Structure formats: C-alpha cells, structure tokens
Amino acid sequence: MPESYRLMRSYFATTSQWKDYDPFQEQKDETFRSSAAAIYRKSRLIILELAHTFAELDQEKAILDTDASKLQVLFNEMLQICLWGNATDLSLLTNMTHEDIQKLQSVGRAAQEDRKEFILLDNSDEAWKVLSSVKDGRVDLVLDNAGFEVFTDFLLADFLITHTPYVSKVVFHPKTIPWFVSDVTPKDFYTLVPILLNKSFFADYPATAEQQKDLERLVTRWDSYIKSGQFSLSVPQSWKTGQPSELADFWTSPSPYAVLGQEAPALMETFKASDLVIFKVNI
C-alpha cells in the first residue's frame, strides 16, 4: 500500500505544472466541511461546557498554575478529544456515510466514557508527570489525518500552551507527500486557520452567532501562535511538495520506527530536544 502512494507521487513529480498537486485535497476538504456540526460542538465543548473553565482560564491562570491536579483533569479531557478525533481516516472510511463519520467524531464526555474499554494501554498519567516537571517545555506531535483530526490536534496544542505553565512550543510533524488519502501535509496545516475563519466554507452548516464567536476567538489565537512560532511545523513554510526534508521524509519511507535513529538521525536529534513526543500515526 505505501508503495502505491510513492508511485503516484512520482508521476506528479515529473511534471512541470502538477508538482504541488494533492489528488486527495478535494476529498479532504469535503470531509472537513461535512464535519462542521462536530467542529462547532467541539468549540462549544472546549469553551462553554467544561464547567465554563475555558471561558475563565485567563482569569484563573495564576490559580491553575499552582494546582496541577485541576490541570491534569483538563489534560486528560484534551487527550480524549485528541485521541478520538482520529476517527476520520479517509483511507479506512470508503464505505461510510458522512453521518457515520460524524458519529465517530462525537467526543463528548459520555462517548469518552463508553470508549474507555477500547483503550488497550493508557499512559496519560506518565505523560502528565513528564509535562508537569518542565517549564517552557516543548511537545512534538506527529500528525496523522487532516481536517477534523488536525483540528483536535490544535485543540490539544492550544491547551498545553495557553492553559498550562509547562509548554511554550508545539512542533507538528506532517507528511511530505499526499499519503493515505487524508494524512496531513504542510498545506493542510497552514490552510486550517483560514478555512476555519472563512464563514463560506461551512455555509451549508450555519453556526449561531455565539458558536461563530467562540470558534473565531479560538482560531485567531492559533493564528497568532503560528506567526510567533509557538505552533511550529517541522518543515519551513516555503517548503514545496515532494521537496526532500531530513526532518520529515521518514514518515513516508518504508522503514519501521525501530530504525528511526539510524534512518533519520536529524529527526531523532530534534526529538531528543523535545520533552514529550506524541505519535498520532498508526503504529
């Protein structure tokens, strides 16, 4: 299967007009657009439903900074949202309707409780111990799917930077070529914010004024984090599709993770500078 994606990429790479073309872009955008109901619900969950905590976190930040137990509860909530956001893998959902996908993307508290039995191993406590022991730390996030899932990845990154005293930077790791239909490319990363701020993109799924305001406030902050480098991509913004990258090519290679240090030493070195690396990809 991976070989077919590399072969497809080789066809486009030999052209002069199609070098940056992503044959799956339209499908990714349409699936993301159809996820609007879940996206607005998520924004409300983060800002309104978590016992109005997110609406008052700025005022309570000093208190939360000294109460790691409260932050850990919120951290576990964010992990759950981020975990189940990966239900939208287009390469696995060829026979599912958009309604089926929206059901999979429901990550409310009741749904989270129901899904605990599907978690084979939960190391969230260990991850929290690592994070809560650092100051101005760095977290690396190896991305999987574009659209709804990367939206939830941004939610986790936002929580870590905005609402904890432990993390000041999150580095995102994309694929360098269109991969397994829905995997995140640099273009997907940089277009997420303008897509979410574009009201016409979700025209078929209108939001209330309150929902729109919640989402705009959140996404505008993400835009500032991208500009400041607090949300950082492992490849530069000037990077072109298919351009070699010693920090990203490993993710579309045939090599297993066990040889990452040998096959991608530069990538391994950058991971050593991170306080926590979260893999969203299928292992």
Image (cartoon, helix red, strand yellow):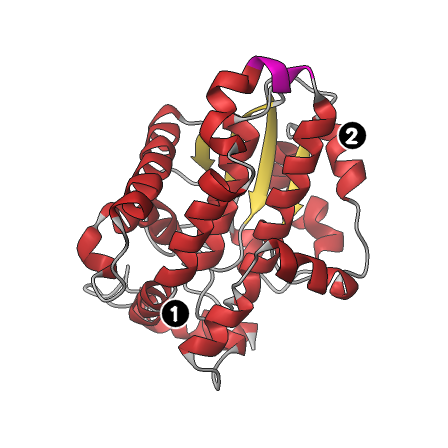
Query: Which span is picked out in magenta?
Result: 62-66
Q: Is residue 161 above or below residue 246?
A: above
Say if 33 sits above or below 124 in the image.
below
Q: Nearer the viewer, residue 142 or 164?
A: 164
Measuring from the top left, give residue 6's x and y in whole percent: 47, 69
Residue, x 29% and y 69% (percent of image)?
26
Q: Quadrant of the N terminus?
A: bottom right
The image shows residue 116 at horizontal and vertical percentages of 75, 60
**Residue beneath disc 2:** 129
Q: Residue at the spot x=31%, y=64% of the render? A: 33
**Element class at badge 1:** helix
Return the residue nearer the eye: 244 or 64.
64
Q: Main secondary structure of the magenta part?
A: helix
Q: Tag count in the figure?
A: 2
- Dot 2 surroundings within 10 Å: few (below 14), some, or many (20 or more)? few
Q: CA distance from mark 1 to mark 2?
A: 44 Å
The disc, 1 or 2, on the residue closer to the chain's N-terminal end is 1
Q: Residue at x 56, y 61 (%)?
A: 86
Which numbered disc, 1 or 2, marks the residue closer to the eye?
2
The residue depicted at 65 percent of the width and 37 percent of the height is: 75
| Residue position for label 1 | 10
Residue 135 visible in the current orientation: yes
